[in-house]
Amino acid sequence: MEGHIISERYRLKKYLGGGMSSVYLADDIILNREVVVKLIKSDPYNKEKMMERFQREVQNTTRLNHPNIVTVLDVDDTSEYHVLVTEYINGPNLKVYIDQNKPLPFDKIVELSLMTLRGIEHAHNRGIIHRDIKPQNILIDENGQLEITDFGIAKALSETRLTETNQVMGSVQYISPEQAKGKIADERADIYSFGIMLYEMITGELPFQAETQVSVALQHIQSPIPNIDDFREDVPVGLKNIVYKCTEKDPNDRYSDAGEVIRDLLNYRNMTTAYKSNTKKEKAAEHTVPIVPPPVKKDSVKKEPQPTPPPVEEKEEKKKRRKWPWLVLLLLLLIGGTAAAALFIKSTPKEVEVVDVQGMSLNEAKETLEESGLVIGEVTREYNESIETDHVINSNPKSGKILQEGDLIDLNVSDGEEPYEMEDFTNKSVDSVKEKLDNLEFKSVNIEEEYSNDVDKDDVIDQSIKPGTKIIPKEESITLTVSLGQEPIEIENFIGNSFENAKATLESQGFVINIVNEIYSDDYDKGIVVGQDPSYGAFLPGSPINLTVSKGKAPKEAKEFQYNVTIPYGDDDSDDSDSKDSDSKDSDSKDSDSKDKKDKKKKSKSKKVTVYIDDKTRNIDSVEDSFEIDEDTPYTINLVLDEGKTGRYKIEVDGNKVLEESIKNE
């Protein structure tokens, strides 16, 4: 592909190698500079989704800005490739450097390790894990500066085609046990891979080698790290123990973060420097401080013999220390004369005044004090806002004190401003959080907003610097993701749909349904929505939606009919017996009989009347009225009928139908 132009900007001019990607040296024809272009084959079966994941993950790495991390310049996609553009480092990778210079001096190993770890620490503090730390991904420029490349690429690829073919992420020679098992990898996976790389820098060999990648991966999971002494016998105990702790199988037994490894390496280097200085001054027997290895798990490391610190002479008080030489001198003058005295004076230690080294860099202070004849003792560190990092706060003894040549002097060195441990601001009010961050003097506080169904409006959803990260606020920018509250929902227009369907749909979306009115409609059947307020737009769940529903077509004009009827009581049995005897009575007795008949009728039992009506508002199966009578009784019936409709009434006495009639409104 040499000569091709990618993304209308990068002309490929030299193939540099490959692996998970094809790597080319290219010319940026817009900015006229050399860059590195990595072409990563995209997945044709899930292209759009994978492209989004790849761009999102790789673009996260553009937030990294550190001298020990290669800068990502551009991210793009073509129809065939994911494209990643980085700065060009003119120099070999660390793998080539190790092979060409092994065995590496221990000072050089520590120097390379510290640069690697500082780049890793910077990325980890921003929530980015490399997942593929190896010498091939570490470049050394012509000035000896080390830079890590491919941050974020391992995760980006793990979410695309590699996981779909069940390949294990990370180069297998440096892979952590948890990655080899397919488990989630955190910062400690990078520390394990660094430990394997440190082993290789010390010994010139990889700890695990086999014919297949699967066999190597199994060794990372199951086999202990080979003894470093089998490859190189002069390795200091402190340096070996750092390797062993980095490469513990259980992540909980390793260093928890890159900062811890950096501290142990600095302690190792400082102690080694003190030891070398003492040797140079031939004071090792008096002043050497033993190299104390970092604490390690008892069963995880082969025990090494620990160096026994040589005895250190206790210093006498200055007055006592100075008194006896002059007594001896006086005695020699009295006994042996001038020659003996001159010999003694020549062998007496020279007095040295402690130089003021406050504010000097540690290396400059060491050089100054050693040139004056003093030996650097313990180097302690503490946070100090006024003294620059790695510069001297004070010495012990202090400046101006008179010591003898070869005496020890301790240095207290600044670790710079005390870092602030990032708090967890999620679910807190953005106003209160921003006020606190402003008081901490962050370089900038940026706000991004998004909807959330879980976090209240104006509360923090996420933060770009994760809780627990130690930072110097004035050197950092932070982005807060703030909740806009629940996301509004675009409502449908349900006019013309059934009320049941509209109600079910809107309630499932969280809206509250109100029936404003029911009206007659010549256009919509009964139960159909004829009005909606609001009828369009996006609204929050819980908002009321008002619906107007059809009652169907309006009825024609109704008419009321009124009928007067007489409900018959019926004949009484006593009246019949009285009539049979009437023929045998004389005319005088007839009047008496008539009076008796009326009295009997008044004493007869009451009968129950039930009225049924079928019209516009009533049903024939329902009782309209019920009462009792003891004689023929007049009754008024009212029927309401629409035009063209028929109604009827029915009257029963003691359960027997006595009247019934149908009426039509014509």
Image: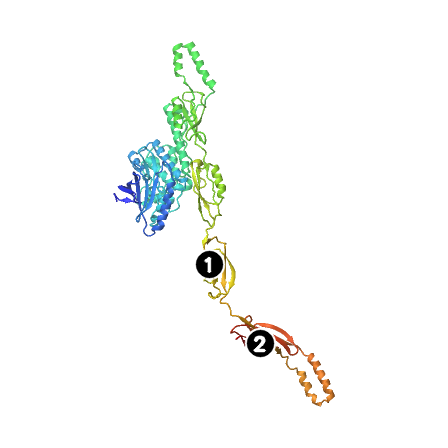
Going from N to C along the chain, the mark reached first, 1 or 2, is 1
Q: What color scheme is it? A: rainbow
Up/down of 407 relative to 8, above or below = above
Q: Which residue is mark 2?
A: 650
Q: CA distance from mark 1 to mark 2?
A: 47 Å
- Amino acid bearing label 2: Lys
Left or right: 388 with respect to 582?
Answer: left
The label number, if any, that marks residue 582 in the structure image: none
Image location of residue 114, percent across then percent down: 37, 34
> Total number of numbered labels?
2
Q: Nearer the viewer, residue 2 or 350?
A: 2
Q: Nearer the viewer, residue 215 or 631?
A: 631
Count residues near mark 1 (Cα–Cα under 10 Å), then give few for <14, some for 14-19, many for 20+: some
Secondary structure of residue under mark 1: helix
Circle nearer the viewer, 1 or 2: 2
Work out whether residue 594 can be spotted: yes
Q: Residue 302 is drawn in which quadrant?
A: top left
- Amino acid bearing label 1: Thr
Does the CB distance between marks 1 and 2 fall below 8 Å? no
Q: Residue 294 is drawn in which quadrant?
A: top left
Image location of residue 424, percent across then percent down: 47, 42
Image location of residue 86, percent across then percent down: 33, 40
The label number, if any, that marks residue 505 in the structure image: 1
Work out whether residue 159 can be spotted: no
Image location of residue 494, percent across then percent down: 45, 60
